[in-house]
């Protein structure tokens, strides 16, 4: 009997931890849908509370997604480094192909960036935690140097948000590493931070509280510092003001700090509340969608934005309309995932990737 209780105790927190991460992944996905629908529908420009709230999601939801990917990679590496490296390299190639195909219809694709994050991230798994934290800092320092030395606007038409030479070797590398929507420098730092978090006791309540408190502090510090410095520097020079922004474009160090803080906060809250949410049925409803976000990400582009285009809703819409459309899509995505999971273990794209690359 004692052995049975010990086994249950060990399995329980592990199960709750995985569900908490799936919940965090679900909420990060919802945030990304809201942001992408808002951009696609040309919504914004007003000072209403809804616009403020949705603007706060820009860059934070995607950053949380990447941190969660890093946690998953780190946990996989802990179970067997050699096999994780082999499988991850093949999955990176799969994501690169899928992402580039997606780029032909959706300029803000993140999947091809993911491929490179994983490529570098899996090669960093053997490093110690201090070295990984140093890499995060180094990536942000490198980006500051690059933005001061290089032309950040190269390739961009900011009126139409199009990148003129993406499909050329020079433009592709520039976009991928420097001035794309989610450039490897410094966005790789979010994946690396996830690897660091994977080495902590995520199932422990004390760790969850530390994530929540430190995340809130980091987020508040980044936003407060940015607001203070922007007020002082913007009147002097718009370029200097841009160096202290927490906007995702360009991703300056204070943005990275805000993104890391938001991710820590979301992950900590979802881990902490997973047991309570399971008791009232929320976990059973949301986790299936959190476990097939690759399928749903592609669906929000192909189906969600495809329907918006068919209805003539791309451009010139309000923030309320964008949020409403995003909410409607997420409701259908949640219901679809719940039904799909009754017969299949994985989402269709996840299952296809597993079949192709293992």
Image (cartoon, rainbow, N blue to C red):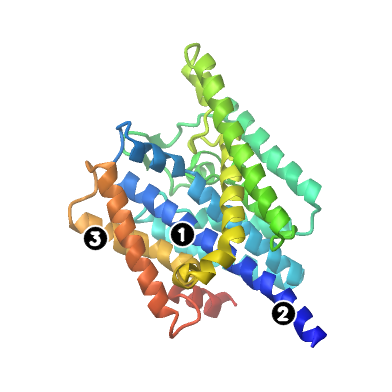
The answer for how far apart the CA atoms under marks 2 and 3 are is 47 Å
With respect to residue 237, does 178 lie above or below? below
Q: Secondary structure at mark 3?
A: helix
Label 2: few (<14), some (14–19) or many (≥20) C-alpha neighbours in 10 Å: few
The answer to which of marks 1 and 3 sits earlier in the sequence is 1
Give residue 150's mark.
none
In this rendering, the label closer to the viewer, 1 or 3: 3
Q: Are marks 1 and 3 in contact (CB under 8 Å)?
A: no
Residue 260 screen position, x and y as percent: 61, 44
The answer to which of marks 2 and 3 sits earlier in the sequence is 2
Can I make out residue 173 in this image?
yes
Residue 346 screen position, x and y as percent: 49, 77
With respect to residue 328, does 143 lie above or below? above
The answer for how far apart the CA atoms under marks 1 and 2 are is 41 Å
With respect to residue 73, does 248 lie above or below? above
In this rendering, the label closer to the viewer, 2 or 3: 2
- Pointer 2 residue: 8
Can I make out residue 92 in this image?
no
Residue 213 screen position, x and y as percent: 65, 44
Q: In this orientation, which residue lies closer to the viewer: 86 or 188? A: 188
- Pointer 1 residue: 99
**Quadrant placement of the N terminus:** bottom right
Q: Secondary structure at mark 1?
A: helix
Q: Quadrant of residue 100?
A: bottom left
- Pointer 3 residue: 307
């Amino acid at each position: 009997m004692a052995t049975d209780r010990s086994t249950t105790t060990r399995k329980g927190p592990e199960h709750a931890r995985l569900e908490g991460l799936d919940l965090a992944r679900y909420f990060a996905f919802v945030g990304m849908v809201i942001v992408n629908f808002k951009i696609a529908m040309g919504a914004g420009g007003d000072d209403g509370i809804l616009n403020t709230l949705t603007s706060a999601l820009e860059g934070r939801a995607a950053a949380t997604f990447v941190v969660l990917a890093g946690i998953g990679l780190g946990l996989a590496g802990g179970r067997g480094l050699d096999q994780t490296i082999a499988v991850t390299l093949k999955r990176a190639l799969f994501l690169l192909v899928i992402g580039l195909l997606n780029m032909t219809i959706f300029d803000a694709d993140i999947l091809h960036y993911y491929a490179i994050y994983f490529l570098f991230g899996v090669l960093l798994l053997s490093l110690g935690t201090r070295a990984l934290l140093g890499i995060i800092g180094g990536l942000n320092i490198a980006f500051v140097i690059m933005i001061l030395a290089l032309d950040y606007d190269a390739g961009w038409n900011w009126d139409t948000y199009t990148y003129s030479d993406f499909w050329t070797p020079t433009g592709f590398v520039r976009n991928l590493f420097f001035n794309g929507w989610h450039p490897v420098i410094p966005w790789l730092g979010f994946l690396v931070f996830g690897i660091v978090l994977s080495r902590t006791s995520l199932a422990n309540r004390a760790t969850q509280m530390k994530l929540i408190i430190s995340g809130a502090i980091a987020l508040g510090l980044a936003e407060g510092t940015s607001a203070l410095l922007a007020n002082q520097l913007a009147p002097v020079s718009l370029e200097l003001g841009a160096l202290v922004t927490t906007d995702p474009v360009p991703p300056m160090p204070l943005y990275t700090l805000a993104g890391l803080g938001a991710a820590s906060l979301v992950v900590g809250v979802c881990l902490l509340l997973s047991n309570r949410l399971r008791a009232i049925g929320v976990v059973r409803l949301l986790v299936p969608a959190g476990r097939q976000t690759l399928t749903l990400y592609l669906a929000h582009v192909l189906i969600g934005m495809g329907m918006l285009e068919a209805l003539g809703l791309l451009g010139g819409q309000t923030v309320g309309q964008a949020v409403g459309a995003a909410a409607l899509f997420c409701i259908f995505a949640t219901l679809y995932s719940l039904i799909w999971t009754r017969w299949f273990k994985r989402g269709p794209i996840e299952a296809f990737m597993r079949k192709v690359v293992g």
